Each structure stands twice: as C-alpha cells, then as structure tokens.
Image (cartoon, grey):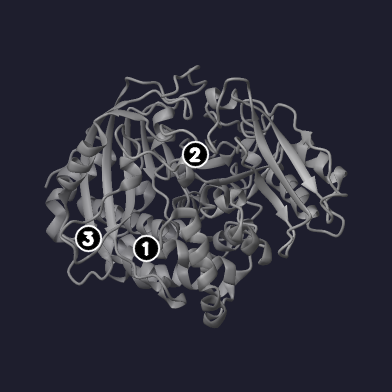
C-alpha cells in the first residue's frame, strides 16, 4: 500500500453523515428515510407537522458527504424550500408519501424531459452495450438511466440542470453560496464527492471524436506524473462548502489529497484533424494545476460555483466512457454522447462554464486546430465524473475529513423474496481484504481506508444487523437493517487518510428490488419512498427506532424513551 506522504491541510472532525449514490433510487431512498425519521421524531415529540428545524434531525453532524443521486437529493434539500417542504409533507403523512413524491418530484421531471416511450425503448440496445462495457453487469438501474439520458438528448450538464430546476426550482444560476433552505443547514459543511479523470500508462480522455467510423478529427488528454510517482485512472475529489457561507466563502476542506495532487505534474493534450497524416497537431502541456487541480479555483471563493455543476460532476456515472475505445467510443460519438462534465482552472465560479465552452468549440467547423488545443492546455480542462469510480458511499472522504463518527445511509439491491438480503458491496470495498477494484484503477488499494475489521468480518456483521419490520404490502422495499461497526483507519495516500485512527460507523442499510426496464416504471421510486417512510414510522418499529435509530442519528445525549 502507498504510504501517506503528507497530512491533511484541513480537517472537519466530529460526526459526519454520508449518503450513498445510486441515481433515482438514491434520491427516493434519501427522501423516504428523511421523511420517515422526521415522522418518528414528530410522533415522539408530539409534532403533527415535523420540520428539519423543529426536530433538529441533523443537529449533531459537522458535515454531510454525498455522491451521485444523493447529491441531487442534498442539492434540493439544502437549496430548495419547496423540496424541503415536500419531504416534510411526506413526514406529516407517510401513508400518502408516494402520491406527494410523484406530484412534487417525479411528474415534474417527466414533464420537463419530453421523452416518448417509443423513443426511449429504441435506445435500449445501445444502453445495455455501454453499461456492460463500463461495469460488466446488466444492472437495470444503470441501463434505465442511460436509456433515459440518450432519449432526452441532453449533455450530462443539461440533464442535471433540467432535473434540479424542474423538480425543485434549483436554477443553473444557483450557487453554492446561495442562502440555504432553512436554518437547519447554516454552518454545516457539504462534501460533494466525485472523481477527476487522470489517465496515465497509455490511456487518454477523449474530449472530442467526430462522428463516423473513421473517427477524425479528435482531441484527447493524458496525465503526466512526477518522476517515480503514480496516479490512479480516477483521482478521488470533493467540492466542499460551508452552507450559508456566501459567494466569497473558501472551501473548508481540501479538494484532493495533497499526496495525490503532488503526484500530478501536468496534463498533456493531443489532437488530429480530418486527415491524420496531414493534420497532426503539436502536443501541448498545461502548467502545474496546483494542490486543488484548478489553481485555487476549487478552494477559493467556492461559493460562486453553480450547485447544478458540482451535482453533475458528482452524478456523472457514465462519465467513464470518455476513456473507453472501440465500439463504445464510436457509439457515443454517433449520438453526440457528452457524458462527462468538464472543469478548468478559471476562477470566480467559472470553472465549468469556461471548460464547457472550450470543449463545445471543438465540435464547430474547423474547431480542432492548434489554437483550440493550446486553449485547452492553458485552462487545464479535464473531466470530472461520479464518485462511484473511486468511492460511491461518501465514507472515504468523511474519513479523510477526520470524522470520529460516521452515520452511513446505504441503498442496495435486494430481492424481496430472498432469504439472504442486501450486501452493501461498496461499503465492504473500503475494508482490507475486500476484492480489489478493477485493474484500470492502477492501484488495488485505492478504496481501502480501513485496516480493521477485515472485509469478510464486515459482511458477517452487516448480515447480523437488526432489521426493522417492513410495512406489510411493500412492493419494492426488502430490508431496513441497522447496526454499528468499530473500525480502524488504514493509511491511504489517494484520500489522504492517516492510519491507526478509531472511527465509529453507524450504518443504515436499505435494500430494495426495483424492476426497472420500461419508461413508465420511474413511478416505482415514488412507492419505494413511501414504503421506507411508513416502515420507519410504523408502530411495529417504534421501540427499536426510539431506542436505537434515533439516538444513532441524534447523538447519545438525546433522551429517548421507548
């Protein structure tokens, strides 16, 4: 394992809540969980209309670390009064939560996308091929999301813009420094987990490839490392913002680990025009990007960064196609598949806008030339994609932030009819002894931030967690399991984790089975949110929720009587 070469510049410490990614499923699980916890607290405290403020649900947490679909959820909870009101309304009436979620979220999203079933189903084969190549699986949720994305014709940035705007009125112009949705959020740090694509060892990021089998012109970049140092294909990163801090607020936490940033010398850009033999352009290198890979643009005045852009970076789960070749590269070029957000070193919140403009210019007539290549290098343009390529749980960055206690909300695949239910594999991957990540990551220890307990023991503990009684008649909710793990950190230079520290892990694992495969089945997520809220608020679970789950969420100082 790589030794840590430098300590953290900043730590947050205390208790941190982490929200695992997972697209639409993560968003509905988060909504159902928050609604259910508010309902349980409201019942205990005698409130018929519990709110984030009146219950102080997140009072003990220093920070919230989110990824992918959970970054959509937290974007809306933190910056949208209407979405906050939706979740609180679901808490006030868990039995009608599905209808409320459908009217207040899903229906608005479907209306904004204007995708017909015929158009949606036509792209199924392409979606399956891309997902299989990226993840080696036929994961229905991933196929569904890609199919939906391709049918809408959006770039990933626009996809997220429309999603946040239509469902919660979080505009593309809403910045991290904007006023939060309520006093519950003031002063809390939001860690928006994602990955920076830093290919070495013969790999490259395709920034633009022309349509057609020949595939020219094209532009790409590769990362150059400091002598004797190594980089993974995907470098873990996190935008950080103190909610309510204002436009000029600086990041309270590092963007990438200093040990990872110091291994990157520069980025090298290469390009070829329409005729490869004649139109070969001169390679050009960026200058040093600094400790935040953006010449301080990711750590200074981060309040100016757009919410939708950092959420897009966190959720671009298909962004990995930018380093793929062959059939997948040609397929995405044919449909103008721009699945990775682009960032640069432009200051004052212009990082994403400046990068997108430079990449878009490549698609114009005559856009691939030496001048455009030089401009990319001058601005250090690079791809930023989903944290699932490094750690999709949000836990690793929470550990790096110095948390002594982490409450982890997971959403996993489970079969409602199976005796053996959910195994949160992404959490297990953080422990020593877990199967290594894909060889393309270049380091088998990329995700291992805990040395104890070993991964097999973690699986045993997870399967032994206490399970709530799922509300009768549930169609998609299979399991709500709750328990704690006493862990010890492992030194990890990719995240900047110091080894030998004790961390209490409080885990809420929600397993569901969603038969996603047709356009209209997005409504299944509405029902899932209700089933979770009802289960947490159920009289059958009141003793366990009050004696175990509420103290876990609120802190041991909270007096709870069954």
| Contact check, label 2 and label 1, Cβ < 8 Å | no
Tell me the residue that label 2 is attached to: 441
Task: Identify the residue at image location x=45%, y=23%.
Answer: 2
- Image quadrant where residue 376 sits: top right
> Which mark is in front, 2 or 1?
2
Q: Is residue 111 left or right of residue 513?
A: right
Tell me the residue that label 3 is attached to: 535
> Which mark is in front, 1 or 3?
3
**Residue 86 in sight here:** yes
Instruction: Label 3, secondary structure: give it.
Output: helix
Q: State which tag comes first along the sequence, 3 or 2.
A: 2
Q: Is residue 212 left or right of residue 302?
A: right
Q: Residues within 10 Å of mark 3 (few under 14, many from 20)?
A: many
Q: Is residue 254 left or right of residue 183?
A: right
x%, y% of residue 319? 57, 52
Tell me the residue that label 1 is attached to: 89
Task: Identify the residue at image location x=57%, y=31%.
Answer: 251
x%, y% of residue 190? 48, 39
> Which mark is in front, 3 or 2?
2
Q: How crowded is mark 1: few (under 14 residues within 10 Å), some or many (20 or more)?
A: many
Q: How crowded is mark 2: few (under 14 residues within 10 Å), some or many (20 or more)?
A: some
x%, y% of residue 254? 54, 28
The span from disc 3 to disc 2 (Cα, nearest Å) is 39 Å
Q: Is residue 378 left or right of residue 34?
A: right
Instruction: Label 1, secondary structure: give it.
Output: helix
- In this view of the protein, which residue sits in the foreground, 198 or 77? 198
Position above or below: 100 against 70: below
x%, y% of residue 233? 55, 38
- Image quadrant where residue 197 sits: top right
Task: Identify the residue at image location x=55%, y=62%.
Answer: 163
């Amino acid at each position: 394992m790589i030794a840590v070469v430098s300590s953290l510049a900043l730590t947050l410490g205390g208790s941190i809540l982490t929200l695992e990614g997972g697209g639409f499923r993560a968003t509905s699980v988060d909504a159902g969980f928050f609604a259910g916890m508010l309902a349980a607290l409201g019942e205990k405290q005698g409130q018929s209309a519990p709110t984030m403020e009146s219950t102080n649900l997140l009072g003990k947490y220093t920070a919230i670390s989110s990824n992918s679909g959970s970054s959509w959820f937290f974007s809306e909870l933190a910056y949208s009064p209407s979405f906050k009101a939706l979740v609180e309304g679901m808490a006030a009436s868990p039995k009608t939560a599905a209808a409320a979620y459908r009217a207040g979220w899903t229906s608005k999203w479907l209306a904004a996308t204007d995708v017909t079933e015929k158009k949606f189903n036509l792209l199924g084969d392409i979606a399956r091929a891309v997902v299989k190549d990226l993840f080696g699986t036929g994961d229905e949720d991933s196929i569904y999301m890609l199919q939906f994305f391709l049918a809408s014709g959006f770039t990933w940035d626009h996809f997220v813009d429309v999603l946040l705007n239509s469902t919660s009125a979080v505009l593309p112009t809403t910045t991290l420094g904007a006023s939060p949705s309520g006093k519950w959020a003031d002063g809390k740090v939001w860690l928006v987990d994602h990955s920076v694509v830093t290919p070495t060892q013969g790999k490259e990021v395709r920034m633009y490839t022309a349509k057609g089998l020949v595939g020219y012109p094209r532009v790409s970049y590769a990362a150059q490392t400091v002598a004797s140092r190594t980089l993974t294909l995907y470098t873990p990163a996190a935008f950080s913002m103190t909610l309510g801090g204002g436009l000029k607020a600086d990041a309270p936490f590092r963007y990438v680990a200093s040990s990872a940033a110091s291994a990157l010398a520069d980025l090298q850009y290469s390009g070829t025009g329409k005729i490869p033999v004649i139109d070969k352009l001169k390679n050009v290198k960026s200058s040093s990007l600094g400790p935040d890979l953006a010449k301080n643009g990711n750590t200074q005045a981060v309040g100016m960064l757009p919410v939708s852009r950092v959420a897009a970076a966190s959720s671009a789960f298909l962004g990995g196609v930018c380093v793929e070749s062959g059939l997948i590269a040609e397929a995405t070029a044919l449909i103008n598949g721009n699945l990775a957000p682009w960032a640069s070193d432009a200051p004052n919140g212009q990082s994403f806008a400046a990068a997108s403009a430079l990449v878009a210019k490549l698609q114009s007539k005559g856009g691939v030339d030496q001048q455009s290549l030089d401009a990319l290098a001058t601005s250090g343009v690079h791809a930023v994609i989903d944290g699932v390529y490094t750690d999709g749980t949000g836990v690793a960055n929470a550990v790096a932030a110095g948390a002594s206690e982490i409450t982890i909300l997971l959403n996993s695949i489970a079969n409602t009819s199976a005796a053996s239910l959910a195994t949160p594999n992404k959490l297990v991957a953080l422990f020593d002894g877990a199967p290594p990540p894909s060889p393309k990551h270049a380091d088998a220890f990329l995700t291992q931030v805990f040395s104890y307990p070993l991964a097999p023991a973690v699986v045993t503990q997870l399967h032994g967690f206490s399970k709530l009684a799922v509300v009768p008649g549930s169609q998609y909710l299979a399991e709500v399991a709750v328990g704690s793990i006493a862990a010890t950190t492992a030194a990890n230079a990719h995240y900047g984790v110091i080894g030998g520290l004790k961390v209490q892990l409080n885990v809420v694992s929600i397993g569901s089975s969603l038969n996603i495969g047709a356009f209209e089945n997005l409504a299944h997520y509405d029902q899932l949110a209700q089933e979770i809220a009802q289960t947490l608020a159920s009289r059958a679970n009141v003793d366990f929720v009050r004696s175990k789950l509420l103290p876990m969420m609120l802190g041991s100082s909270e007096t709870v009587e069954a």
